[in-house]
Image: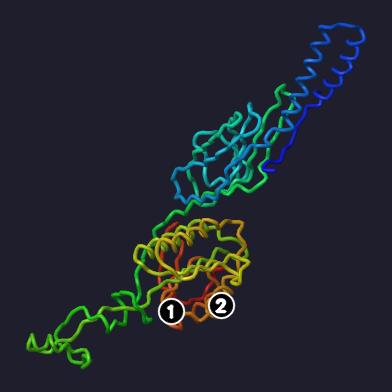
Amino acid sequence: MEWRKEVIINRNLNFARSTLIILIILTFLFGDKWLLFILLTAVILLFIHHAYISVLGRDLHLENDKEITRMNIDDEGAWLFTFKNKGVPIVKGSLNIAFDDCIEPTTYPYVKNRSFLEISIPFKAWTNEQVEVRVPFSAVKRGISHIYKFEIKVNHLFGSGAIILNYNGIIKKKKLVYPNRKIVQSLKEPSVLFHGYQDVRNSLFFDPLQPVGTREYIKGDSFQHIHWKATARMQQLQTKVFPHSGARHWLLILNISEGHSINRDLEELISYTAFLIEHAVKENIPFAVAINIRTHSDIPYFYLSEGEGRIQRQKAFEILSMLSIHSFPFPPHLMLKDIEKRGSSVPIIIYIGNQNTASNNVLLSLKMKKSTIFELENANGQGVMKEWSQVPCKRSG
């Protein structure tokens, strides 16, 4: 069954039924035809009402296709539900919905219950009618909004109770609200110490297969880089000019913990991480993301493998949307050790969040493998990024 039915009956209705039966018997014995007719009519209405209750919702169908809407804070959208009623008419009904509070309805009043919002919307559907219910909302904060309660409440025709139709399945619609992007100061690129094929101006390496021009020969230039045709044309030695290239991909490491709990500045740290991801996409920088939340996969923490572009940003923003104070943190130094153990060299590591002595020791080991490490701090509500250096650390992680 698509709907689970719950019938709420007023005790007075059962008493009224028993009283009617007794009155019918007495009326039949004493021969009052008009009173008997009235009482029989009342009984028939009660039986019709009982039959209506028994079939209500049997042929009511909700279109429940999977739907994910991605939004930014202050964006507007709507829940849209489509019903097809092939059964008995539904009148005097209300559609009751509860969902996460990262979005707020804009046209219907709501009641806040912890981290959920509940709304009640008038609902009716005649036989063979298709009904669309639209619930406009505005995104107010980062998060994911699922629907936890979806029910139709129909009052009894005589006001003697109600029928509640609870949807049996999981509503497959959800709304993802991406985090704000808070500007990070002192964002600069270091010298690249790894070979690669990306165009990097401050790289120590160049691509010898793609010369981009020539210049006058300088003492010390390699003999094999002399451009002989240009030399003959200019009547003096000319050296080939090559584009600087290297590997400049990033590894963003977000530590959400502070000691054994969640960092009190979690929202700010997430907003800074989102800004860095946006910057990486804008500058065509490949990036990976590691976050110390426990997972049930082969890697015990969240790890987004290296990628670039809008699809990579979408994957990263989705996990950032899911983080909450109820997330279970994984020890950050163990996450760093696992990253180091995997052995893949990363040109630029950006560490976001608290540090402790154990995590600093692993960062130092990564730095000795020629990774350039930045740390991002939340200084009085301002994100500041600077090159990491190991100092006596009193911060907890």
Along the horizontal axis of the image, is 82 left or right of 387? right
Frontmost residue, 384 versus 336: 336
Q: Name the residue: 54% across, 49% down.
A: 174
The quarter holding residue 101 reads top right
Q: Quadrant of the C terminus?
A: bottom right
Location of residue 371 in the rendering, given as x and y in whole percent from the top left corner: 43, 79
Amino acid type of the residue that numbered disc 2 sits on in the rendered structure? Lys
Determine contact: label 2, label 1, CB under 8 Å.
Answer: no
- In the displayed structure, 258 sits above or below 36; it is below
Q: Name the residue: 53% across, 69% down.
A: 303
Amino acid type of the residue that numbered disc 1 sits on in the rendered structure? Ser
Along the horizontal axis of the image, is 27 left or right of 286? right
Q: Which residue is mark 1?
A: 371
Q: Name the residue: 75% across, 28% down.
A: 51
- In the displayed structure, 130 sits above or below 175; it is above
Q: Which residue is mark 2?
A: 337
Is residue 346 something that shows in the picture?
yes
